[in-house]
Image (cartoon, rainbow, N blue to C red):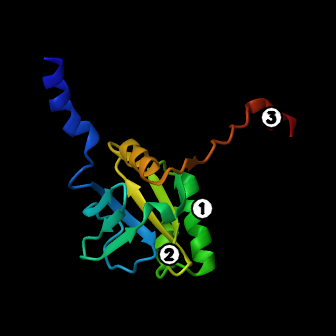
Amino acid sequence: IATLSLVLLLPTVALPQVNGFNVRYLAGSVETKTDKDDWRNNLIILSDEIRVELKDGQKLSVDPKSVTSISYGREATRHVARWVALGILVHPIAALGLFNENVKHYVSIEYETVEGKKGGLLIQTHKNNYRNVLALLRGATGKEIETEKKKPKKSSNDNKQQ
């Protein structure tokens, strides 16, 4: 019975998702006319490839070994601001709506291209699967996920003293 349980459980735990994760493609190294509010973009994370398949048919493939950093949360949007400043993004206008205080599950992936240039990608994952996305990215790349530390709120006493 234990062996049968392991055999039935193993495929769901050990194998990567075949269909991947539905994500919003917000910005990155690929120019697209896909709406940034569209969830029908596919993120596939394998041990030898991280691939984003956009709704318009374009694909972006990244070797996990070339990933230099992965960020989650508001920190991810700051990385995009750096890409805009460096002129890496083709459509920096797409990043304008990202600098708000809403809590959304942003994930940025920075990598080095075969030509030695910096590349990047910013996606929004769904609230039901962002932990799985982060775990798979960490496993595929071996990189720790950078997260923004929350700033402590000022107490009412701090405001009275000023």
Label of residue 158 in the image: 3
User: Farthest residue in the front direction?
Assistant: 3
Q: CA distance from mark 3 to mark 2?
A: 48 Å
Which residue is at the front of the view, 120 or 114?
A: 114
Q: Earlier in the sequence, mark 3 or mark 2?
A: 2
The residue at 73%/37% (across/down) is: 154
Quarter of the rendering containing residue 34? bottom left
Q: Is residue 45 above or below residue 113?
A: above
Q: Does residue 104 show up?
A: no
The crowding category of the residue bearing disc 3, from other C-alpha atoms within 10 Å (few below 14, some 14 to 19, many at least 20), is few
Task: Report the Cα–Cα distance between label 3 and label 1.
Answer: 28 Å
The residue beneath circle 1 is 78
Provide residue 128's location: percent of width, then percent of height.
32, 42
144 left or right of 44 in image: right
Q: Amino acid at mark 1?
A: Arg
- Residue 57 position in % (x across, y down): 24, 76
State the residue at coordinates (26%, 55%): 20
Which residue in the protein does label 2 denote?
113
Q: Residue at x 42, y 44 (%)?
A: 135
The residues bearing labels 1 and 2 have C-alpha atoms spaced at a distance of 21 Å
Most foreground residue, 137 or 74? 137
Q: Amino acid at mark 3?
A: Asp
The image quadrant of residue 76 is bottom right
Among numbered discs 1 and 2, the one appearing first in the sequence: 1
Residue 153: percent from the left, percent from the top? 68, 37
